[in-house]
Amino acid sequence: MDRTQLIANFVFGIKISAFQIGGGIVLLLFALSMIFGESKPEEEVRLAADHTQTAVFPLAIPSIAGPGAKLGAVLLTENHRFSWVEQLTTSVVMLSVLGITLICMLAASTLYRFVGDAGASVISRVMGLILASVAVSSVLEGVKAYFAV
């Protein structure tokens, strides 16, 4: 057991597998909102136009590194499971994904003109389904690890 697990287990009585289950559930909820389209972009745009509500936009930025990314970073950088080379590889991949995300954000208006409303809706739902499968896998792995002890 590494230092992080010891601290979490000693201070809070929480196992890493419980974090994996919790992160998977939060990720599943996020994926379901993508699939069923529960987000309200019109309301967010209206709030952003209101200068008293400008804090809404910066709060949306952390969803780029949401529960799935955070959970993945924690799980793929466990010192007792992965060598420093593997952890460095994980870090390089994460930085590459952030770079690709930046490029996509800079090209978002061009991409949106190309795919349109219907294409954006389809892409969002397909990505939500993929995200849901990753979330369920995370929950199942966490349950398996939790009861394996």
Image: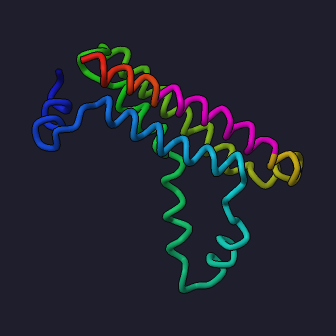
Magenta span main SS: helix
User: Hey, which residue is sitting farthest front in the picture?
Assistant: 147
Range shown magenta: 122-138
Tell me residue 104's x, y (percent). 69, 44
Query: In terms of image quadrants, where is residue 45?
Result: bottom right
- Is residue 32 in the magenta section? no
Q: Is residue 24 left or right of residue 46?
A: left
Tell me residue 113's x, y (percent). 87, 53
Query: In terms of image quadrants, where is residue 76?
Result: top left
Task: Report the number of discs.
Answer: 0
Residue at image x 29%, y 15%? 81
Residue at image x 25%, y 21%? 79
Tell me residue 9's x, y (percent). 16, 35
Q: Quadrant of the C terminus?
A: top left
Q: Quadrant of the N terminus?
A: top left
- Is residue 133 in the magenta section? yes
Residue at image x 64%, y 51%? 33
Figure check: 108 above or below 47:
above
Tell me residue 11's x, y (percent). 11, 42
Q: Is residue 90 left or right of residue 40?
A: left
Residue at image x 38%, y 27%? 142
Figure check: 5 above or below 114:
above
Query: In terms of image quadrants, where is residue 20?
Result: top left
Q: Is residue 30 left or right of residue 94?
A: right
